[in-house]
Every structure is written in structure tokens, then in C-alpha cells.
Amino acid sequence: MNKKPGYVFVWPISTRLIHWMMAFSFITAFITSFYEHLLHDHVALGFIFLVIIIYRIIWGIIGPRYATFNTFKLKPSELKEYFVEKIRNRWRKIPAGHNPASSWYTVWAIIVGTVIVVSGLLLYGVQEAKGVFRFLNDDYTDYIYLLEDVHKYASYLFFAWVVIHITGVLVEQFWHRTGMVFAMVSGYKKTEGEDTEVKSLLSFFAYMMIFMAIATYFFIISSNYNFLTLQKYTDIDYEQVHPVFYEKCGECHKIYPPYLLPEKSWKRVMKGLGNHFGEEITEANITKAQQASILAFLEENAAESSKREAAVKVMDSLEKWYPKAVTKTPYWRETHQDIPRSVFKQKEIKDKSNCIACHKDIDRGNLDDMNIIFHN
Ligand code: HEC
Ligand code: HEC
């Protein structure tokens, strides 16, 4: 006997939580992806999504009635029939479990979702040199753009999928009047079939996974330095590493980390000290020997020899052209193009070359997205 006459209990609370946590983590991760300084939150939300996908896959194997993959209707002929029936018969009966469209939808969501989290984790490792795959930054920076595209377009695809899904549910709700919107809230569907039951061991597993997803989120949010978020690079104490460079080149502005420009640019900067952005720097300020030592240091640590995201991208954006300023590189212009000019004129900033006003610790070589001080 079903608990509620005329209705079938299809989605137990554990399945409903999977559904809503997946929806919530995807949407919030999608939104935060548009803000560089929210990368940390984006990654934490992505981890909820990751744990939930793993959970959904296991749930599809060992889960309760209506949730398992073997009840999915995946034959193309069934899908066609489903839509033909949908158009022909407004008052058709709906199945208790997944219909052919929602079966396909779930399988696709799991596949595309997996592509999103795997490419995201790899990108976090290769590009940001962070997380469990940070070691991949050593050799695989050539793949940054490919990974970025896969991650991005898979997410767009998933987003489009979400829109189609919501449309489908609304059509069910308002055209077919099957009360679909409430099914994922109350767990009940207006149809025929047997109520589902979840064994207590299975429930325990479900709550463990949900707990894991939330715990992972807070574990990431709480620290930039645990094994899921740690960066391969640590802060550089330039004062220690090259005191002359630190002192002489940090006199009028904070030092610019050498990895932000290629060797040829640094050569130009050091040859042109006589007219350095309107300032005249002479041997009275920095002796010939000091200049030579600074140039050697800058060249040794120039963009060519670094795998940091900014170094790689500055190099990729320059083609046989070696500007004397980071702010002249196409990469810098591109990453800062959305910042209104008025922001750079604020009195705490004054000038676009005043990186440290917005990038805490850049004078220690740290350009972590988390360190961006957001002005607007
Ligand atoms: C006498 C003051 C002074 C000293 C010393 C000095 N600079 Fe500068 N530098 C400036 C000014 C002024 C600018 C223009 C941007 C600004 O207003 O901060 C600038 C800009 C730069 C930029 C371009 C920043 C951008 O917009 O991307 C680089 C690179 C740079 N300096 C490197 C150096 C190096 C390397 C040394 C040490 C050899 C050095 N500077 C020493 C005054 C100085
Ligand atoms: C007005 C504040 C501001 C100033 C000044 C500024 N930046 Fe930025 N920078 C930002 C913001 C905000 C972002 C993130 C843009 C986004 O969301 O895509 C950013 C992004 C970057 C990135 C890309 C980070 C990434 O991981 O994608 C680099 C590299 C960078 N800035 C370097 C510099 C350097 C070098 C200077 C100084 C020559 C500088 N910035 C000056 C605000 C600033």
C-alpha cells in the first residue's frame, strides 16, 4: 500500500538532496566563474559538485528503486515515443521513475558534469599550480588553453541542459498538470506504482556523502594552504634573494616580479634608465655594477623561465614585441579591460602601474587570485 493514495513516493530525501545540491553547486559555481577574485569559492563549490556526482554515480548502482541506472529508459525508440505521446496526449500517464527524457538528461548530466570537474581540477593544477594536480604545472602549461576551453564549453553545455530541463519541468507542470515541480520537493509523484524505500545502511551512506560534500566545501573555504588548495609557488623574499634589486628598483614603486616580462623587455628597461618613464636614473643612483647585477637577475628570472600563469600568458600574448611595461602587454590589457578607468584614478590607487593597490603581496611575487583587492 502506498502512503498517499493516488501518489507514489518516488524520490526519498537522499535523492532530493543530491538533486538540489547539484543544482545549487552548479549554479553558484557557474556564477562565481565570472569573477577572478572568487576563484577560491568557485573551486569550493566545484568540489560539492564533484562529490555529488560521485555520489550520484554510486547511487545509480546501489541506490533505491527509481534511482538506479538499470531502470533508465535509454533506447532511442523510447525517447521518440515519449515525445510523440507528449505532443499527442496532454493527459497521458507519467511513469513513477525516470521517463526516457529524464533518463537521458541524467546520464548526460553525469557525463558532462564529470568532464567539467576533471577539466576544472586539471586547470587548477596546470594553470594556477594549485590543488592536487599542482605538479602538472611543471610540464603541461601548453594545455592551459585547451583545458580552459573544455572546462568552459562543457559548463555552457551543462547550463543549456539546465535550461532545457527547467523548461521541460514547467511544461509538465502547467501543460500536462502532472505536478512535476513538487515531485523534487515532496518526493511524491501523481502516478501509479510502488513507493520507494531506502534501507538504513543506504541512508547512512547517502548522509555520509552529503556530509562529505559540505565538509569539503568548508575545508577549502577555510584555508588557501591545505592539500586541496595549496599552490606550488611560495612567496619570494626579494629583499633576501637580491637586496640591490629590491632596494634600488623598489625606491619609487614596489618592485615588479621579474617573471612578468621577458628577457628582452628587461634589457630594454635597464638600457633605458636615462629616461625611465619620465624619470632620469643615473649611475649616481644605481652604479654600473649594480645595474649589471640587476639585469642578470631579471634575465635569469624572466617570463621565459617561469611556469606561473602570468608569465606563461604574458609570453603567449607577446609576438616579437618587447614592451618596457607590464601594463603594455596585451595580456595585462585583456585581464584589466573590464576595470573602469575611474577605478585606477581612485586616490588609493592613483595609477595602473600601482599593482600592489589591488594585488596584495605582488612584491613577493604572489599574484594569487585570492589576493586581489577588489575596488569598484
Ligand atoms: C626614480 C624612480 C624610479 C626608480 C628608481 C625605478 N623606477 Fe621603475 N618606474 C618609475 C615610474 C615613475 C614608473 C611609471 C609608472 C609609475 O608611475 O609607477 C616606473 C615604471 C616601471 C615599470 C613599468 C610598470 C608598468 O606599468 O608595467 C617597470 C617594469 C619598472 N618601472 C621597472 C623598474 C626597475 C627594474 C627598476 C630598477 C632598475 C626601477 N623601475 C626603478 C620610477 C622608478
Ligand atoms: C585597480 C586594481 C588593479 C590594479 C592597479 C592592477 N590590477 Fe591586476 N587585476 C585586478 C583585477 C580586479 C583582476 C581580476 C580581473 C578579472 O576578474 O578577470 C586582475 C588580474 C590580474 C592578473 C591575472 C590574474 C589571473 O590569475 O588571471 C594579473 C597577472 C595581474 N592582474 C597583474 C597586475 C599587474 C602586474 C599590475 C601592475 C602593473 C596590476 N595587475 C594592476 C586589479 C588590478
Image (cartoon, rainbow, N blue to C red):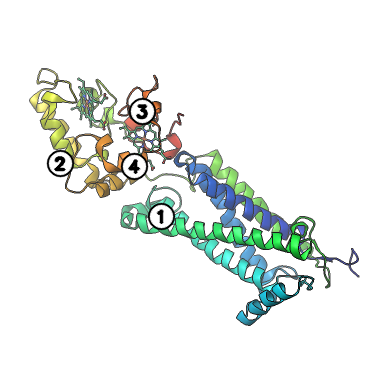
| Label 1 – label 4 distance at C-alpha | 16 Å
Residue type beneath disc 4 = Glu
- Mark 1 neighbour class, 10 Å CA radius: few under 14, some 14 to 19, many 20 or more: some
| Label 1 – label 3 distance at C-alpha | 27 Å
Image mark for residue 40: none
Residue type beneath disc 3 = Ile
Q: Are marks 4 and 2 in contact (CB under 8 Å)?
A: no
Q: Which residue is mark 2?
A: 264
Q: Which residue is mark 3?
A: 356
Residue sitting at 35 percent across and 52 percent down?
137
Does 334 sit left or right of 208 as displayed? left
Q: Which residue is mark 1?
A: 148
Indicate the position of residue 374 as horizontal and vertical percent values: 46, 31
Residue type beneath disc 1 = Glu
Classify mark 3 as within 8 Å of ligand 2 or not, answering yes or no. Answer: yes
Classify mark 4 as within 8 Å of ligand 2 or not, answering yes or no. Answer: no
